[in-house]
Amino acid sequence: MLKNKLIVTAGIIAGTALLGLAGGFFYKSKEYFTGQFGRNTFISNTNVSSLTVDEAVAIMNESRDFTIECTKNGTSMRIDISPAVTREFSKDEVVRCMENFTFLEYFLGREKDFQLKPVRSTVDEGALRDLLEQTLPETTAKAEDAYINEDFQLVPEKMGDEIDLNSLIRDIKRGIDTGLEMSYVLEAYYIQPELTKDNKKLEKAAKQADAYAKMKIAYKFGKEKEVIDWDKLKKYLKYDEDKIKLELKTNWVEGFVKGLAKKYNTYGKTREFKSTKDGRIKIKGGIMGWWIDEAKTVEQLKKLLAEKKGKTLEPVYRNIAAQHGKDDIGNTYVEVSLKRQHLWYYKNGKKKLESDVVTGKATKDRQTTVGVHRIYGKQRDRYLGTIAVQGYHTFVNYWMPFNWDGQGLHDATWRSKFGGNIYKTSGSHGCVNLPYDFAAKLYEQIEIGTPVVVY
């Protein structure tokens, strides 16, 4: 009994299903054979589902429900741009789309997407721009160019999500004209930075700044140094954003070198000297002393800056002294006292030689020049002066010149006495006359550059 009921129930269900299928088939057949498009049909981005050809052409020409697809970060949205678009399609082309359907595709409701090129199309760019601005995602960050910052470091570019509407509108118009499917990945339309860190000019400027940052020029003055490093150089670096060019201004170099000369030059200055017999005395003048050649030192420094080369060096000197520091004489020197007519030679602070001498006659034209001088040469067996100019032509065995007046230390074999007041009436023409044996010893021990202190 139960079995019979189950069979009856199954039959009813099967019959009902067959009736439903038959009804659906009849309904679909009626639509298909009466010339309607399927339920998932799109032609050139317009939904023409269940419409006849004439109805489809009408709404396609009206651009009704004409949408484009935009995707950002993988999320898609459809934007209706029909208010900004006018199109005209060929009815014959739409008919061919209808003829492209098979009954099975129609019956199963498969999606069909046809792309037809409009016969004509127009776009209201202003209206399209307004629609896009109202619908597209808001900009969260604008692109930023790479640049050289105030510390002269290269800052990389930053990517943004601001959309280049001009480019997007251009491609939309092209898509409308072609009738192809209109789908746009918005990332492809982001406004890009104009300058990136790979820009050749930016790279060059950054490398230049890095070279200057690593560069250190040190002018040494004995134990003291005057340093030109990044802290100083960056004050004179100028970055031209328009030309993308880094330039080191060098108009400060002359002033810098002038400052060195003012601080370290000793040439012509008054010095304090601890004499052997007369205590501490002050002496001015002489040819010894530090004297920076400012023009050549400026040239030297500008060349290093142009080459971006760090270096420890000395300025270019026009004249030099024995050592740097407050006392540029040092502890190796020749001391000549005009009053005492005596000479002492000290080496490394220790007295090595001393002797009575005869200096220049005590007249304006023949007196020995007071000041701190230096030995600038040594020569054996030579004649001093000429009869025509100096009125004498004298042979000496040991010649040690010490100033620009032609004065020097030398032996005087024609003299039998030294010291006392001889210089007042029978002094030399400015040279310091020495006993032969003493001159020989001094010549052997003294070096070129040794200071000669005359007071």
Image (cartoon, helix red, strand yellow):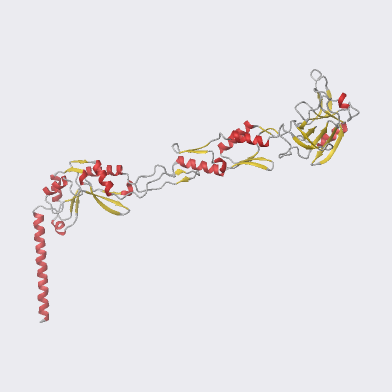
Q: Residue at x 57, y 37 (%)?
A: 305
Q: Based on the displayed image, in which of its 4 quarters is residue 416 positioned?
A: top right
Rendered view: 316 above or below 394 = below
| Nearer to the camera, 97 or 197 | 197
Q: Position of residue 107 (x, y in %)?
A: 14, 58
Left or right for 138, reference 42: right
Q: How many marks?
A: 0
Q: Residue at x 19, y 43 (%)?
A: 86
Left or right for 306, reference 369: left
Q: Position of residue 397 (x, y in %)?
A: 84, 29
Q: Position of residue 396 (x, y in %)?
A: 84, 27
Q: Based on the displayed image, in which of its 4 quarters is residue 111 positioned?
A: bottom left
Where, quadrant-wise, is the C terminus in this rendering? top right
Left or right for 219, reference 36: right
Residue occupying the far top of the picture: 388
Q: Position of residue 417 (x, y in %)?
A: 90, 29
Q: Based on the displayed image, in which of its 4 quarters is residue 345 positioned?
A: top right
Q: Residue at x 22, y 41 (%)?
A: 124
